[in-house]
Amino acid sequence: MAEITTVSPLAPEHFPELPTIEGVKFAAVEAGVKYANRKDVMLAELAPGTAMAGVFTRSATRSAAVLDCQEKIAQDSDAGAAILVNAGNANAFTGKNGVTSVKAVTDAVAACLDLPETRVFSSSTGVIGEPLPHDRITGKLEELRGKLSSDAIVDAAEAIRTTDTFAKGATRSAEINGQTVKIAGIAKGSGMIAPDMATMLVYIFTDAKIARADLQAMVSSLNNVTFNAITVDSDTSTSDTLLVAATGASGVLVGKEDQTFRTALHEVMLDLAHQVVRDGEGATKFVEINITGAASAEEARTHAMAIANSPLVKTAVAGEDPNWGRIVMAIGKSGAQADRDLLSIRFGDILVAENGWVSPDYKEEAGASYMQQQDITINVDLGLGDAQDTVWTCDLTHGYITINADYRS
Amino acid sequence: MAEITTVSPLAPEHFPELPTIEGVKFAAVEAGVKYANRKDVMLAELAPGTAMAGVFTRSATRSAAVLDCQEKIAQDSDAGAAILVNAGNANAFTGKNGVTSVKAVTDAVAACLDLPETRVFSSSTGVIGEPLPHDRITGKLEELRGKLSSDAIVDAAEAIRTTDTFAKGATRSAEINGQTVKIAGIAKGSGMIAPDMATMLVYIFTDAKIARADLQAMVSSLNNVTFNAITVDSDTSTSDTLLVAATGASGVLVGKEDQTFRTALHEVMLDLAHQVVRDGEGATKFVEINITGAASAEEARTHAMAIANSPLVKTAVAGEDPNWGRIVMAIGKSGAQADRDLLSIRFGDILVAENGWVSPDYKEEAGASYMQQQDITINVDLGLGDAQDTVWTCDLTHGYITINADYRS
C-alpha cells in the first residue's frame, strides 16, 4: 500500500464553512482502531424526532454494520438517534465476529446516550477480514459524549477519512414559505486502505421537518442521479453507506413534493459525489459523461457507465488524447441499443463524429487542446429516442497502479 | 501511443512448428497500408469443398468487414474460398466508405482467384475512423497470388500483428479411425494501435472433412470456453473475428459428435486464447480463475469475469499481493448469487478464506510466496450448487497505462 502524501490535484481549495444544524451534535476522538495519532472514531447525536433515511451497498458480501443499518433504517421512531463511525477497520468478511462487534458498539452507544439500540447506526471502513477491536471504540464513548458539540462536524469529516487526500463537506439551504432550512453533509471515499477496496461513507444532516418515508423516497431517488452515477474504477465496496438525518429542529415542514428542499438536498449530494470522484485514486482529470437520445434512461445509464468504466477511455483521458474511437468502442460493447450511423460524439461543444464517421469539420488539434483541461465533458447523442443520463468519473493513471499494486506492508 | 520494444515476459519461447494443412496456401506482402517495411497483408487460399465457420464480435459498432463476414459465413458452398487480412487500419467507424472498401477488396480477391465474391472473407485491424486505402491492398493481389505457398503460415501470423509483441500460432492433431487430421491456427491480439482498441483476429485451418453446420456448431460452442473466456481489460473490439476453415483434404470424415477432433480443436483454440492473454498489454502475470459450486454456469461466468475484470484484483496480482479481500469484493459486486458465509477462496491449493472469514490455518507468508509465481490460479467455491466456469486474464500494471495513456503521435 503506497502512502498518499499529496492532496488530489482536483481537490477543492478548502473545506467549506458548514452551518450548525440544530438537533445534531458531533464528536471525534483518537481511538487507535488502526491508525495512531489521528482521530478515527466519530459520533453524531441526533435529537428526538429526527427522521432517518439511508441507502446502502448492494454488494452480496456487504458488512455486518451495513446489514444492521438496513434492518433499522425502515423503522419509524420518535426517539433520538446516533451514528457511530470508525475508520481503519471495515469489519467486513469477519464471520460471526462481525455481528458481535456491531452489537457491542451499538449497544454501548445506546446505553451511553440513553437511546433504544434500534436507533444507533454504525459504519466501519478500512481493512477487511480483520476482527474489529470494538473495545477500543466502546472504551472511548464517555470521552465522545463529553465532547459532543454542534460545531464539530469538521472533526467528524476528518475522523472518517481513511487514505482520502482531503476531507469532504457540502452545504445548501432552502427557503420554504419564507423560512430557511439548512443541509450539511460529509463524505469519505476513493482513498484506499490496505488490503481493501474503496469505500464511500456519506452523512447528511438537515433541520427540516420531514416524515421518514418521504425523506427515504427523496433520498433513494436522488441517490440514483448522484452517488450511483459516479464511478472511479467500477469496483463496489462492501461498506458503502449514505445516511440522511432530518432533525426537524427548524420547525419547517417539508413534504415529499417540495422542490426547493429536494433541489438543495440534490445539490449537497451531487457536491459530495463529485468530491469523491475528485479524490479518485490517482485522478488528474474530472470527467462528465452525458448521454442523450437514448431509447430509455436505463440504456442511457448503461452506455454512460460503459464509457466511464472503460480502461481504454480512462487512459486516453489521462493521456489528454481525444481518442473518440475508444468512445465508439465502449458504446458498441455496452450491450445497450446503439446505431453506429446515428451516433454523434462531442468533446464539450466540439463535434467530433457523426453519421458513422469523423465529422468533416473536426480538427484533431481542437480535440487535443480541449483534452488538456482538468474538467472534461464527453457528450454522446445516440439519435434513438428522448432518454438521457449523466455520470461522472476520473481518469486512470500511473497513480492508480502505484496506489493499488504496491504490496501491503 | 508508446512503442512496444520488448517481447511480453509471458511469451512462449518460440513460435511453434506448424504443419502444412493440405488445401490451404498462404502469402503475405508489404502493402504499406499504414506500417512501412513490414508485411501487413496476408492472403489464405482455400481449396474447393472447404467448410467455413466463424464467430464475430457482438459490438453494436462492429466494422464493415465483420458485417460482411457474418452475412457470408452462414452460406453453404462447394466453391473454394479466401481470407484476406490487413493490419494497420481497422476500417471501423468509417461510414459508407467502410462498405465500399470491403467490397473493393473482396471483389478484387474473387476476381484474382476466380472465386465467387460470397466466398471471400476479409478482416481489418488497426486504427479506426480513417478510410482504408484499399487500392494499396488490391494493387498487391497479383504479388500475393504469385507467392501462395502451403508453407507460409508463419508469414501470415507475422503479417496480422499490429503491436502484438509476438506472433501467435498453435497446432494439434487428432487420430480418427486410424487416420490423422491436422489443425493449425494463428492469432493476433492484445497489442494496441493508436488510436484504437485491442483487436483479436484468429484463423484456424484443418484438413478434416466436416459439414459446415457441424463445424459452426462446434466452433460456437468451443468459443464460449476459449476466446469468450479471456479478458485483458474488459474492453471489446469492433473487429474481433474467428474464422475456421476445414479443407477436407485429408478425406477423414468428422461428425459433430467426434470427441477426438473436438478435443484437438478445443486445445488449439485455448492455446491461442492463452497466447492472447500472455500478450495482454503490460501483462506480467497470467491468471486462471476457477469458480465452482455456482447456482448456474451463467452465474459462475459472471463471478469469474467480475474477478478477472476488477482493477483492484488485477493491480493486487501485479503487486504480488495475496489480497483476498478484493476477491470477496468482486464476488459481492458481480450481481450473481453469493453467500458470504458459504464462500471459500484458494490461491492455488492454499486455503485462504472459508465460512465468511480468513481460514484459521492461512499464513499470509504462504499467500505472498504463492503470488510471486508468474502463473497464478484463483479458486473460488461458492457452496451453492454444482455449476462451474474458468476464465483467464492478466494483471494490470504501469505498462498498461504507459501503452494506453501516451498521446498518439
Image (cartoon, coloured by chain):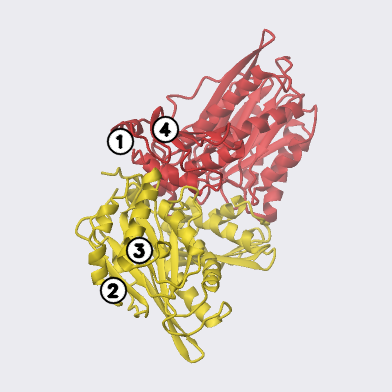
Chain colours: A yellow, B red
How packed is label 1: few (under 14 Cα within 10 Å), some, or many (20 or more)? few
> Which amino acid is tagged 3?
Ala
- For marks 1 and 4 on the same chain, the one whose residue lies earlier in the sequence: 4
Q: Is residue A341 above or below residue A258?
A: above
Q: Evaluate if marks 1 and 4 touch, with contact meaning CB atoms under 8 Å apart.
A: no
Q: Is residue B208 left or right of residue A7?
A: right
Q: Please report the residue visible at 48 percent of the width from the left and 25 percent of the height from the top.
A: B15
Q: Which residue is mark 3?
A: A110
Secondary structure, mark 3, is helix
Name the residue that disc number 2 marks.
A152
Task: Residue under label 1, please give it.
Answer: B364
Q: Residue at x 38, y 75 (%)?
A: A47
Q: Which residue is mark 4?
A: B346
Q: CA distance from mark 1 to mark 3?
A: 37 Å
Chain holding disc 4: B
Q: Can residue B309 be seen by looking at this rendering?
A: no
Q: CA distance from mark 1 to mark 4?
A: 12 Å
Indicate the position of residue A118 as horizontal and vertical percent values: 43, 62
Task: Give neighbour class at mark 4: few <14, some 14-19, many 20+ (Cα, 10 Å).
Answer: many
Q: Residue furthest left?
A: A37
Drawn side of residue A294 relative to residue B308, left or right: right
To which chain does the residue with label 3 belong? A
Secondary structure at badge 2 equals loop
Cα gap from disc 2 to disc 1, whole angstroms: 40 Å
State if disc 4 and disc 3 touch (CB < 8 Å).
Answer: no
Of tags 3 and 4, the one toward the viewer is 3
How far from the left and from the top, in percent, is residue A85?
A: 34, 61
Q: Are marks 3 and 2 in contact (CB under 8 Å)?
A: no
Report, in whole angstroms, how far the alpha carbon at label 2 lies from the one at label 4: 45 Å
Badge 2 amino acid: Ala
**Quarter assignment of residue B372:** top left
Amino acid type indicated by mark 4:
Arg
